[in-house]
Amino acid sequence: MLRMTPIRLFAFAFLLTALAADPAAANERARMTPADADPATTWPQWRGPSGQGEVTGSGYVDRWGPEENVRWKVAVPGNGNSSPIVWGDALFLTTAEAAGARRSVLAFDRAIGKRLWTTAAPAATPERAYPKNGHASSTPTADGERVYAYLGNHGLLALDMDGQIVWHKSFGELNAFHGTASSPLLLGERLIVVQEQQRAASFIAAFDRRTGEELWRTERDTQVGWSSPAAISVTTDDGEERDEIIVNSQHHVIAYAPEDGRELWRASGTTFEVIPSPVVGHDLLFSTSGRAGPTLAIRPGGNGDVTDSRIVWTAAKGSPFVVAPMLVGEYLYMVNDMVSVITVYEAKSGEVVWQERLGERMREGFSAAPVAFGGKIFFTNDNGETFVIKEGPDFELLHVNRIGERTIASPALVGGVWYIRTDGHLWAIGEETG
């Protein structure tokens, strides 16, 4: 069982409040496990407190440009695709310099964008990386005491909120196809890391968040992939309540037990290169599989090979290569980033509701994960164009925002402000004041 820290108790109380507001959700047998954080004031991990891009609160603008609704804009040294995270008055992200030989965690003041500190990881030889991926694509996570960052050959790093290294874990030289990118997952006292590699054992492992001690490691029979793990809470067919760590990966979606890393179930049907992380809702887990491959809707909570017993529906093609899907209400939204086409499914049945192109057709043209609030869904392409789509069963493009810089990283949204990382800059986007 996971220890209920004070912050986790707050997150649990918030979940109960949300379930009370939505009686249908209270009866769901599978749901994403919320982060140990106040969702109104933090964005503690990739895709936010919910782990699937849901935005809490109000006051966010839906229009911006290089000179419109910009609170501040500051330069970020080096290169990286990692997303900003937010805790308290600070933002954190990672960056790489000197062709990946130097990798650092950066902290910025939320209010004005001033850089507060820079902490470099212990030196290491950089692994090979695909140019678009680079050497700083993994988004850090935080718990209010520490910031945790996974930096490939430079290891797993825990820093206090002032930037001092608390502990460091080296994995040696990794032989990762196209480099590393999977973001760490914080679940109770455990920090979960997934690393696929060639000519060496791929693995999922858990570490004590306070000491860095390795608690367990499970070898994986996959070699290629960059999906980040997700934590879900399920009620099994036997009525058992349990947590599952889900990894969307090469040829299989696999669930692990967080307490000891044993494999709980697997479903076959994904393709060779898998990047998008799954989303959960309507008692289903939705897995999308690289380079326009299949989409799987899986009923979690099973045991063993569930390919024939718990896959509820599939879509043979059209999945994103990179971009995580967005589940809003009754609908599952996905952009096929190989052709810039968005497809919307009725989540429970897999029926296609509508399909439209977003902007010009581009190969690998979208990377950032979408977010949603106020009946609108936001998809940003690599050129920094954000397409604002009306939620619902009919296609309506409300408008397009253009920030004017290449944008690969996913945004963070806290307290009415967007925080967007572009090539070379970090932006705060919000209603202009005084």
Image (tube, helix red, strand yellow):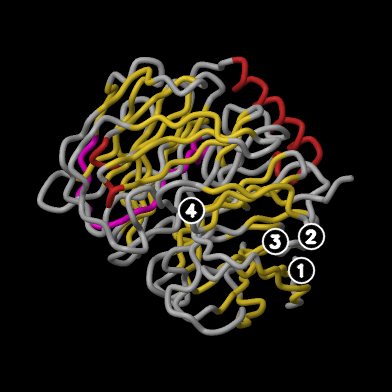
In this view, the mark in front (3 or 4): 4
Q: Amino acid at mark 3?
A: Glu
In contact (CB < 8 Å): disc 3 and disc 4? no
Vertical placement of residue 45 versus 189, above or below: below
Vertical placement of residue 27 versus 216, above or below: below
Q: Amino acid at mark 4?
A: Pro
In this view, the mark in front (2 or 4): 2
Vertical placement of residue 230 versus 267, above or below: above
Q: Is residue 153 left or right of residue 269?
A: left
| Image quadrant in which the C terminus is located | top right
In contact (CB < 8 Å): disc 4 and disc 1? no
**Quick one: label 4 or label 1, which is nearer the N terminus?**
4
Tell me the magenta residue range: 218-238
**Quick one: label 3 or label 2, which is nearer the N terminus?**
3
In this view, the mark in front (1 or 3): 1
Residue 328 located within the stretch drawn in magenta: no
Q: Which residue is mark 2?
A: 375
In this view, the mark in front (4 or 1): 1
Coordinates of residue 121 in the picture (x, y in percent): 32, 32
The residue carrying pointer 3 sits among few (fewer than 14), some (14 to 19) or many (20 or more) residues within 10 Å by Cα, namely some
Q: Distance between the Cα atoms at labels 3 and 4?
A: 16 Å
Q: Which residue is mark 4?
A: 278
The residue carrying pointer 4 sits among few (fewer than 14), some (14 to 19) or many (20 or more) residues within 10 Å by Cα, namely many
**Quick one: label 3 or label 4, which is nearer the N terminus?**
4
At mark 2, the secondary structure is loop
**Quick one: label 2 or label 4, which is nearer the N terminus?**
4
Q: Distance between the Cα atoms at labels 4 and 1?
A: 22 Å
Q: Distance between the Cα atoms at labels 1 and 3?
A: 14 Å
Q: Is residue 290 left or right of residue 16?
A: left
